Amino acid sequence: MVTIIAALTNFGQSLAAIGMSLLYSVLAVFQAAFALVQSTIESILKLGQSITTLVLELFQGVFGFVFANFAAILVIGGVYYLYTLRQQGKGPKMLQKKRL
């Protein structure tokens, strides 16, 4: 009788150990997913910081001043061009005026 009780106790402990291992595995998967999301967000923020640094360094000095003026002229010209296309009704469907 003692051997049957010992065997059942050992079996129960083994099942509990297997259950705990499965629980730890599921928690490890969630931790890995969280680490992936955290790493992705961190990388995106670092990319934005690098782009900001690049733009700020590019627009320094005389070359930066000239380049910034050309960029402003291009943006203003592009907006004016799209506006005139919209007024004439020749632009893409999303830019055309809605007629009632």
Image (cartoon, grey):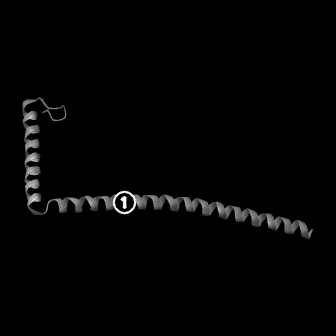
Residue 75 to residue 27: above or below: above
Asked if residue 7 is positioned above or below residue 97 in the image, the reply reads: below
Name the residue located 34 percent from the left edge and 58 percent from the top edge.
44
- 75 lies left or right of 22: left
Taking the spot 10% from the left edge, 58% from the top edge, the residue there is 63
The residue that label 1 is drawn on is 43
In the rendered image, the quadrant that contains the C terminus is top left
Q: How many circles with numbers are drawn on the protein?
A: 1
Name of the residue lying farthest toward the right = 1
| Residue nearest the viewer, comparing 96 with 68 | 68
Expressed as whole percent of the image width and height from the top left, the position of residue 34 reads 47, 60
Q: Residue furthest front?
A: 63
| Residue 18, quarter of picture | bottom right
Q: Is residue 27 above or below residue 2?
A: above
Q: As drawn, is 43 to the left or to the right of 31?
A: left
**What percent of the width, then of the height, locates residue 26?**
58, 59
10 Å crowding of disc 1: few (<14), some (14-19), many (20+): few
Residue 16 location, x and y as percent?
71, 65
- Quadrant of the snapshot with the N terminus: bottom right
Position of 34 with respect to 28 (left or right) is left
Callout 1 secondary element:
helix
Q: Position of residue 53 (x, y in %)?
A: 23, 62
Between 54 and 81, the one lying in front of the other is 54
Judging depth in this view, the residue of 24 and 44 nearest the camera is: 44
Tell me the kind of residue under disc 1: Ser
Give the residue at x 90% y 68%.
3
